[in-house]
Image: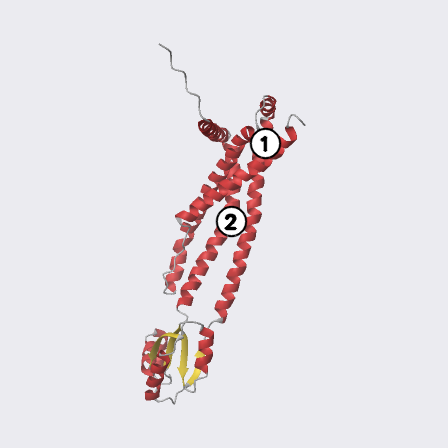
Amino acid sequence: MSTPQPTQPTAITAWFEQHLYSLSASLGRALRKPWATLLTIGVMAVALSLPLGLALVLGNVERFAGNVQQARALSVFLKQDTDATRVAALADELRTWPDVASLEWRTPDEGLQRLRQNPALGGAIDQLEDNPLPHLFILTPAHDEAALAERLQALPEAEWVQHDALWRERLDQWLAFGERLAWVLAILLGAGALLVVGNTVRLDIQSRKEEIGVLQLLGATDGFIRRPFLYLGAWYGLAAGALALLLLTLAQHYLSQPLAKLAASYGSHFALQGLTLWQALMVMAVAALLGWLGAGIVTGHFLRLTRPER
């Protein structure tokens, strides 16, 4: 009876085992140097958290600006001598305009009552003999508010149209500048993260220079030699991404309470919004890719200089 011959591993199985070994071996090498590893991860995490933090701040400001723009109402103050019948007819007419989404008509008595609710003005208002307030239309534009404001100002009954679009345009310009600044910081600090990983991997390569030379003499391919260092860089990047997310979470938790109190003092429920799960996973992936690239650049340069044929 013949003994069964051991099956030869397939190319895919061998490839998978090599990568699995490189993955575990690179993690072991990182854990055997805890202080150097923590220093590299910490520097990378700070470099990643700065542009991410700026992007989060801009996102929250833009979200707040979007909430304000959703209520971009136009206030139309009518002339004092406008008859109430004409005001009612004008309100019905304006509601039919296609560029008017909604209209609220506030009479002088209603406006005075709202002012009387303010404790600082209640006493002064009670001393008034006549109501000095005009009829007021509060309109929500459906399309271009600037064009609607010009059209409303042309009405013969309109005394003044309050239109506060200039500050929103300036805010949009600042947000565009901040977004570009965040990209510049991301590129510069991303390059810094590449250099940090590259320098750490370079030191690791120097400590294994003789071992790498023996592998090259034995015919090992560049891919076989490079693979553990690539995974080492990826581990650095992955851990740095996780630490950067932790730093941002702690910063958000630290700032949320005073911001909530500040918003509540203005009658707002605005709260800081952090990264979503998908965005956090993207940060981790990009950080790991940065570590991979940094290790790949340094390892590739070293292997080009130390090939036996050279």
The foreground one among 14 and 115 is 14
* Front one among 123 and 309: 309
Work out which residue is located at the far right of the displayed protein and give it: 310
**Which label belongs to residue 50?**
2
Name the residue beneath numbered marker 1: 203
Q: Label 2 is placed on what type of residue?
A: Leu
Query: Which residue is located at x 50 percent, y 64 percent?
Result: 172
**Residue shown at the point (51%, 50%) measured from the top left:** 51
111, above or below 274, in the image: below
**Residue 204 placed where, x, y %?**
57, 30
Residue shown at 49% from the left, 47% from the top = 49
Q: Which quadrant holds residue 128?
A: bottom left
Q: Position of residue 126 (x, y in %)?
A: 33, 82
Choose the circle earlier in sequence order: 1 or 2.
2
Tell me the crowding category of disc 2: few under 14, some 14 to 19, or many 20 or more residues within 10 angstroms, Cα based. Answer: some
Image quarter of the N terminus: top left
> Does residue 10 appear anywhere in the picture?
yes
Q: Which quarter of the rendered picture does the C terminus lie within?
A: top right
Q: Nearer the viewer, residue 217 or 101?
A: 217
Mark 1 residue type: Leu
Q: Secondary structure at mark 2?
A: helix
- Across and down, in percent, residue 264 comes to 37, 62
Place of residue 276 in the rendered image (x, y in percent of width and height, measured from the top left)? 40, 50
- Cα–Cα gap, marks 1 and 2: 26 Å
Asked if disc 1 and disc 2 are in contact, CB closer than 8 Å, the reply is no
